[in-house]
Structure formats: C-alpha cells, structure tokens
DNA sequence: TTGTAAGCGTTATCAA
DNA sequence: TTGATAACGCTTACAA
C-alpha cells in the first residue's frame, strides 16, 4: 500500500507504451483522445496509484483551481452554512477553497487579501470586515483581472459582482410587522452604515415608517457595533426616555444586540412585548433561548455560498461575463416569535 | 502598478548581475550568503515587485508549507477561536491553512482527508466527526510519515499526537461543585462515548461521585447526540421519575442539551436551581442567555489552536519527535453561574 | 561566499 | 488522434 515513489504520467505512459502527452490529455478527458485510450489510461492510473501533482500542473498552466474566501468571522451558524454551500459548489466545479478570517479588522483583511493573491487563487470571495472603509486592497486582483465576488457584506465595484439578501426588503417586512402589531414609536438599533447590510436595513425601516404615515424620529435610531455590551447600553438609552416618548418597539439589526437589550430592559421591569415589542435579524441560536423568543430574519446561508461560488466558477469558465450577473439577490425569511406579538 | 509579466528570481539575478542561485538563497536568508548581498536582493525584489511562485517551489522542494485542518463544524465560537489561534501560529511559522468541515459525518471526513492528502499538506490537524468510528482513513498520512495531530476530539494512534483539554478533570470539578451545592442525585447527559471528550467527561463524573460516597446509578446517565431536540427529550426522561427518585441536578456534556432540557423542564413547572440544578460544558453564547444563566466549562480555544500548530511545526522542523510530546493537555475553566447555585 | 547545471511533473506548441 | 520537445520558476548537488 505505501508506495515508495510517486507515480507520474511518465510511469503510466511507459506502462501503456504511449506518450506522456496522451496520458496528460486522457486524464483530463480531452475530447481529441480516443475514448478507449482514455479508459485504458484511467484504469492504469488507478492501478498504479497515480495522483496528479497540482504544483507541476499549476506551474505550467498558471491556474490553481483554488478559490480564496475571506470572512469577518467563522463563528456563526450563518457563516458555517455559507461555507458548507461554497464547499459543495466548489467541489462540484473542481475547485478547492482557502479560508481566512479578518476578525472584523481592515488590516487583517488586507493581509488576507495579499496572502490569497500570493497563493494565486483563481478567484476571490469576500464578505467585508466591520472595520473596512475602502476596498483598494483588492485592486491587485482587479488589476490582474482575477474575479472578486463580494457576498453578504458587499461593496460596489465596477468589476466585482455581489451576492446578497434583500436587506432592504427584509427590514421593511420586519418594520411593517411591528406596525401591524400596533407599534407607533419603533426604535432601530443599527450598525455601521458604511456597510450595505446596515444601510439597507435602515432604509427599509425608514420606508416602512413612511409608507404607514409614521414620523421618522432621529432619536429613535442608534447606530453602534451591535455587540453584547452595546446592546446593554442601548437599553440604558431607551430607559432615559420620558414615559410617553419611550419607544414601544425595537427593531435591531442583529440578534445579539436585541437579546442583550431585552435582558437589560427586563431587569429594569419592562415587559416584552407588552411594553416594548422586539425584532432582531440573523436567526442566531440565542434568539430561540431568550424569553420571550425573538422574532427575527433568517438568511439562506447555504444557498448564498452556492450561488457565490457557482457564479464565480461560471465566470472563470468563461460562460458568463461578470458584469452580466452583477448582483444576485436571495430571499430571506421573517420568523415571527413571541417577542413581537403584542396581541396574543 | 499592474505588471505585465511576473518577476522571477532570474529577473532579480539579471538586475543585480548575480546568479539565480544566490537570489534563491538570499530570499530565504540562507546564512551562507553575504548579508549585504541579501539586503540588495531583498531591495531589488521589493523594487521589481517580485512574488515567489509557490508551485515551482513546492514542485522542487516537495514541501507545500500548508497544513490541513479538518473540523466537525465551523459554527461555534470555540472552533472560531481554535482556528484564529491556528492561523496565528501558522503564519508565525510560515505555514498556510486549508480548512474543511466534516459536518460530523465520517464519510465527509474521509473525503476531506483524501483531498488534503492530494493537496499534499505538510501536516494535518483533525478534530474527529461525531460519526467517526475508525481512523483508518488517516493511514495514508501515517504510511507516508506525514504528521497528524488530533485536537479536542481525538483518537489514540501510535504515530499521532493529541492536544486536548482535561475533560476528565473538568467534569470532576463540575460534579464536585454540584455535590458541594448539596445535590445527591446528579444526572449526566452524555455524548457518544467512542469519543474521548464524552468518555472522559463521564469518567470524571463517576469518579467525583465515588470520591464523595455517592452511588452511581445507571438510570441517571443518558447518552445521545446532545442536540436541541435531544435535550428536550432528555427533559421528558427526567420528568418520568417518581418524585423521590428524580435527579436534583443535571450535568450535561454540552450547553445546547443543557439549555433545551432546562427550557422543557421550566415549561413543566420545575424550578431551577431549587428543584434541579444545572451545569453544562462549552461556554456557548446561549449559556449566558438562558435563565437562570448556565454554569459551564470554558475551553481555551485560541491556545488549543496555537498549541496544536506549534507542536506540528516543531515536528516538521525536526525539532521534536512526535512521540516526545504525544499529548498536550490544556487547562479549562469552571464558570459558575446561577443555574447551579442552590444556596444563594 | 557564489555559481553551474540538472531536474521537479506537468502542459503548451508544433508537428505528424 | 497521437507524439516530441520545450518550457513553467524554483531548489539543490556539486563545483569553484
């Protein structure tokens, strides 16, 4: 079983009395090779325990069959699903993935981009870090015409494609749902509006208010980093309102901030949803543990991963121009739970 | 900025009127190269925009400077921390990571192992899938003397090293803590005991009982897959006991099962911790959201990742024999929260 | 301390 | 449909 020496296409060639060129072609099912020859080659390769040397191949062909993935963090069920979807599509298309996390830091993202570039990935998939304010560090890719696809946390670029959920529409739905529950002063806990996801959620919130003739009040929008601590602080902000001006609902741009805000409000004697209704975003596991359970928005992570890789692979195979499908928008799903049901 | 042609060591050599060999050596800080020559080479490389071609290098040197990582799932804060620690150590040691998830399935783990093998990783880091019952699929690595390190979910192998936390000791501490709170009939929710982590936690639980003269009762041990649904079912099991025989504490081998068991028990009118005290394992974010907050065990994920990679790198550099440091045990930490404090 | 020259295993080119 | 040959860019004996 344990081979002494690596088997090369020359060994196969010698074994079959044909040329290495033919073996090379046969192994990749090149159409110009006789189908019976191809079969013989495949059989011999199996028998001899041949495995292709990707370095030699990459060196010569200048393709690595590898895609780079840069994500802010791996520790969410959403990202795990995205990556599973990416892996699935990638292996179907004959690509491997290199994964790196930026830990939400712009400089780490730059480093990662450089590493990916030096590893000569055939294409790049990026979800931007919270701290990223410019996407210049991807210019090395654009300059070399290496395709870049942004997903979820995206930025506009003439040569880059985007895969996103309809953050605007989802936020609109959430807000409308709260309005339909009778809420009139809906607060929005938002993130860095330089990022599309947070900007779009804010827009959806505003539009829903406008469409239902509710005034927009700047004091009812608080932007921050959406962490546990920040969610707790947001509760303090809410508690400072005079009784009459206090919001009767909160729509948070993520579940973490929503949940920690709820915990702090509950501790202060606020009843949820009677006094203040709540809705979050992400369908994080904690949304099913907090009492009352949190109304939220579910992302289709697996599909997003698949869509991003499939689109990238199509582009690499020359099937589509990257501009032809510049933005793919996936459907998300409103999950209604007790935290927003005032009339139950 | 956008170079037309890739710069090679020959371009640098020509530029400086020296040989490519010297450039190659200079670039890797080979000691036999004059330090001034090295400086000149580095400077020219920077100036010309040289980037090393890893394929040519790997092809020739038969090393990839790449480590493979196979994990059950990426979607836990623990795994994210592990990977961050691995990345940190890897980049310090000059290695890159390829990451794959087995999704807890043995056959996916086998596929991943094969992919890693074909990618010719210099070493492999594995946390075993829930469904894995044999580690034969890693024999291709052992046969070729490619080092394999198991971490967290490990298996014994003469040629493989392990990096783990002291599951036995942590479980012992948890159980002792519950006993000190006055609990006498402590139930254990466990996982697949083919996996070290669950077998060791069970052992620690048993030993703590024995050391405190509490009888071990088989009916108080329930093994399962530790999912949300299973945790809910475990609650039904607990509710079936006659009042006098009902456990007065539960030590779960993970937080998910503990939390969903708590939710179901609370719904049935059980008071926590008064009627039944609870402790979990993992320090999952949900443990801080459930009421009362869950006593649990925190893993040092980042250190574990660093330790695993550092150990692997040392071995690859020939600094240590893999048998010399066959098992590294890291300290974990008991986090006491309200769910286990009966006397508060 | 530096250089010469021979490969590593594959694929592109050109020819048959 | 197949083959001969020359790269791809780097490392490493061996030599100087």
Image: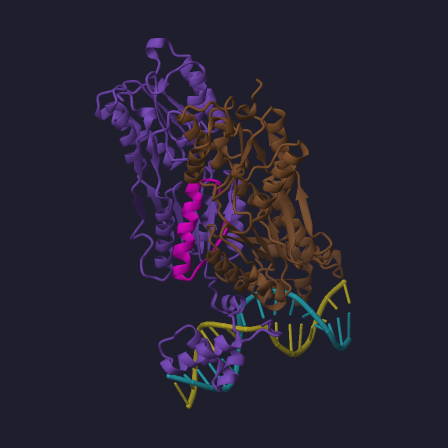
Chain colours: A purple, B brown, C yellow, D cyan
User: How many numbered circles does the render carry?
Assistant: 0
Along the line of sight, the residue nearer the viewer: A129 or B333? B333
Q: Residue A342: image x %, image y %?
A: 29, 21
Q: Is residue B238 above or below residue B123?
A: above
Q: Is residue B203 above or below residue B58?
A: above
Quadrant location, the C terminus of chain B: top right
Magenta segment includes B319: no
Residue occupying the point 56% across, 44% down: B198
Residue A60 located left or right of residue B163: left
Q: Residue B160: image x %, image y %?
A: 64, 56
Residue B39 located left or right of residue B256: right
Q: Can you tell which quarter of the image residue A264 is in?
A: top left
Q: Residue A74: image x %, image y %?
A: 48, 43
Residue occupying the point 31% across, 58% down: A320
Q: What secondary structure is the magenta-colored segment mainly?
A: helix
Q: Residue A47: image x %, image y %?
A: 50, 77
Would residue B332 be seen by someone viewing this image from the given angle? no
Q: Which residues are magenta?
A: A72-99
Residue occupying the point 30% across, 18% down: A185
Would residue A165 be seen by someone viewing this image from the given angle? yes
């Amino acid at each position: 079983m344990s081979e002494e020496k690596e088997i090369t296409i020359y060994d196969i060639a010698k074994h079959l009395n044909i040329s290495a060129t033919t073996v090379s072609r046969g192994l990749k099912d090149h159409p110009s090779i006789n189908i019976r020859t191809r079969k013989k080659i495949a059989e011999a390769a199996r028998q001899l325990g041949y495995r292709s040397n990707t370095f030699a191949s990459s060196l010569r062909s200048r393709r690595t069959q590898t895609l780079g993935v840069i994500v802010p963090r791996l520790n969410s069920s959403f990202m795990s699903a995205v990556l599973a979807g990416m892996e699935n599509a990638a292996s179907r298309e004959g690509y491997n993935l290199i994964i790196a996390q930026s830990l939400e830091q712009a400089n780490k993202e730059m480093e990662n981009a450089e590493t990916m570039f030096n590893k000569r990935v055939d294409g790049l998939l990026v979800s931007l870090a919270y701290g990223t304010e410019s996407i210049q560090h991807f210019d090395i890719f654009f300059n070399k015409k290496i395709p870049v696809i942004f997903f979820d946390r995206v930025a506009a670029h003439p040569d880059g494609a985007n895969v996103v959920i309809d953050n605007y529409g989802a936020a609109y739905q959430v807000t409308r749902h709260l309005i339909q529950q009778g809420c009139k002063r809906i607060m929005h806990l938002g993130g860095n509006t330089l990022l599309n996801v947070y900007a779009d959620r804010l827009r959806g919130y505003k539009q829903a208010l406008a469409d239902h003739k509710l005034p927009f009040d700047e004091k009812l929008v608080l932007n921050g980093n959406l962490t546990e601590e920040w969610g707790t602080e947001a509760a303090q902000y809410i508690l400072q309102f005079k009784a009459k001006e206090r919001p009767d609902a909160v729509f948070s741009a993520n579940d973490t901030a929503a949940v920690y805000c709820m915990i702090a409000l509950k501790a202060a004697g606020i009843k949820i949803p009677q006094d203040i209704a709540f809705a979050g975003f992400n369908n994080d596991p904690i949304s099913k543990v907090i009492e009352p359970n949190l109304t939220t928005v579910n992302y289709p992570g697996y599909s997003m991963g698949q869509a991003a890789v499939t689109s990238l692979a199509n582009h690499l195979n020359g099937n589509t121009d990257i501009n032809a499908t510049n933005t793919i928008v996936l459907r998300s799903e409103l999950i209604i739970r007790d935290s927003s049901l005032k009339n139950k």
